[in-house]
Amino acid sequence: MKREFKFDFLGRELTVETGQLAKQSNGSVLVRYGDTVILSVCVMGKTPVTQDFFPLQVLYQEKLYSVGKIPGGFIKREGRPTDAATLAARLIDRPIRPMFDENLRNEIQVVNTVLSVDQDNSPEMAAMFGTSLCLGISDIPFDGPVAGVMVGMDEKGKFIINPTAKESEVSPLALTVAGTKDAICMVEAGSKELSEKQMLEALMFAHENIKKLCEFQDEIIAEIGKEKVVLEPAVINPDVDKDVRDYATDDMLAAIQIKEKLEKYAKIDEVKETTIEHFAEVYAEDEEFDKKMKDVSKVVNQIEADEVRRLIIEKHIRPDGRKMDEIRPLFADVDILPRTHGSGLFSRGETQVLATTTLGPLSDHQVLDGLGIEDEKRFMLHYNFPSFSVGEVGRYGSPGRREIGHGALGERALAQVIPAEDEFPYTIRVVSEVLESNGSSSQATICSGCLSLMAAGVPIKAPVAGIAMGLISNGKKYTILTDIQGLEDHMGDMDFKVAGTREGITALQMDIKIKGVTKAILKEALDEAKKARMKILDVMEEKIAEPRKELSKYAPKVVTFTIDPDKIKEVIGKGGEMITKIILESSNVKTVNDKDAVKVDIEDDGRVIIYHNDSEVIAKTRSMIEDIVKEVETGVIYNAKVVKVEDFGCFVELWPGCEGLVHVSQLDYKRVEKPSDMFSVGDEIIVKSLGYDNRGRLNLSRKEALPKPEKKEDKEESTEEKKTKKRTKKSEE
């Protein structure tokens, strides 16, 4: 039976429908937020899987019909997820994952299908709400509810919940927060150098409104929620637990305190293997051999986590011996690669990233075939994480969720300082190659990417650096860690990444494994991150203090000027004939796709942007375009070339692309019977502009440009005057 629930959320109606669609799933809801409509469905597998990790999959399926579009390309159907869809799925996955029972091993899929999109009402936030609610009303064990909101800011600094498309365009803050009634559990943000104080206020403002959405879900769950499946707790044999801890704890403690990563991990693996081999002999004759050996494996892994966490919380000792707020050794360099337009290398301990910057014409922008209003972008950051960076073999192919997510974070952090298109009319691509990794490669990407931008001469507003903060908590005490490495990330409770300039934050991302963090923890983490960011910027600025004034000799040079928008069609010509001619002639190439061909971008507002490595080619291209759009002034005399002779007159060219007619009546003061008797194609003549007729045609006159001949009566009068003067002179004599 269909049920409907409504909630007025800050002046916008949020409606939930259930009981009518996708009834064979464990739980399904249709969420309407304005004209945005999302179907959220969850399904649980019938039997547990054998993997040691929780098999959760969250999907966010964009349907282009939801925004009235037909997919591009030859295959007119949706294909692999767009980057935006992948990021939306990650956004939903991250806050709900910690809310599942640790004993759950049944495969769970949550599918969010975007059916209709109203750009003023976020489909991502509606999908997060729908995900939590469909899990909440299902029989799947889920310790929710969870909800999310977006936060923007108006020109007066006032925070806005779920800003409209127009409000988002001018907002200096784009913050997404998810949480429960009690605490925040996920953060994603980009901002125009907001202070730590402002960011913390925005986070708390978001959480106050998240509570309202969670309460609405609780009301629905209380009314129609199914009884949850009861899971059998995974109990480890207490004798096995004691024996394994007695045998392996000391060796594991020594292994995790080895400073060098690969040596540390090798020793940890050795301790685990030795422990398993030892107890395989001990339990060789035991009837419960398989079960006990699984317990041995679980206990030895738990010892590793327990000892890392105990050392940090109780003794303030980190695995590599650093202080809680100490950053690993830093290194920065530029110009590693001679032929790229810009390159930067950044290392933090055993994490090392090489980044390159490539500049191209605006026509190289990325086309976005998605659900958003934006359909193109001129700044891109791509993140690559090869397996060799962690000393392993692995699969190589298209980027996965991790690479797309880390790339988006780096792009968001640096996009805040990228110059506007009219200031720097280039498409900019930064590529991050992770060469070594021991935690926080995404933040090293931001640092190396910033170095490469400055080396390339991109006039960024200010240098940007990033740092990853961690948290270890036992429920009573907690410790904040600066610059977490891989082991601390894996065993810790929070990964809190903060990027920014000296003035403020440009990007923020927080993921947690516990069910939430408090305001006090967030404030301390932001404050410590700021201190670390200043130290990193010191090292970066010591290598390159500001963007270079000159571009690389291998980067395309650019000239920008403006023409009358009404003249654009004349520059392009019929079927692109004129612009093709300009490109071929100015570049001296045979095809416009030649690598040496000049690039010309013409914007709708009349801006013309010319790119080429050779300044002379740019100058010639500009001259040809300016000749076409140059206005003919009425009454001015021009040199012209005859291009066509007809019985009714001559067509002449004032300059390339500018032609007009000299009517037969305007060729000479005397009558002209046949223009071809006087002129041939190629003749040079002078003409005077008579202006344009009512059909926009240019009329010219040769006659008006010539000296006006004297009339017959003027000549006769002149002769008589001479005779008179002569007689007068004789009489005077």
Image: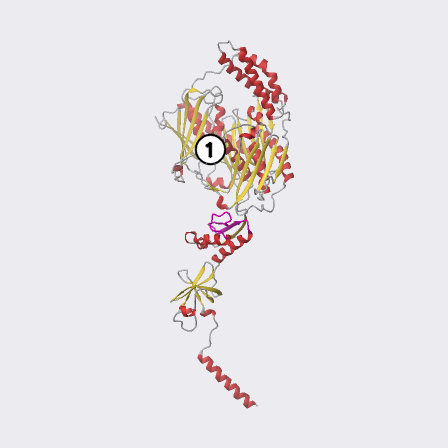
Quarter of the image holding residue 523?
top right
Q: For the magenta stretch, what is the residue range?
A: 588-614
Magenta stretch: includes residue 728: no
Query: Could you tell me the amino acid type at mark 1?
Result: Thr
Which residue, given by chain and number where applicable, does mark 1 sit on?
86
Q: Position of residue 18 (x, y in %)?
A: 38, 27
**Front residue of this view, candidates 284 and 49:** 284
Residue 44 can be seen in this image? yes
**Front residue of this view, candidates 728 and 558:** 558
Q: Position of residue 579 (x, y in %)?
A: 46, 53
Residue 193 can be seen in this image? no
Mark 1 falls on what kind of element?
helix
Rendered position, 619 above or below 671: above
Q: Residue furthest left?
A: 1
Q: Quadrant of the N terminus?
A: top left
Q: Position of residue 149 (x, y in %)?
A: 48, 32
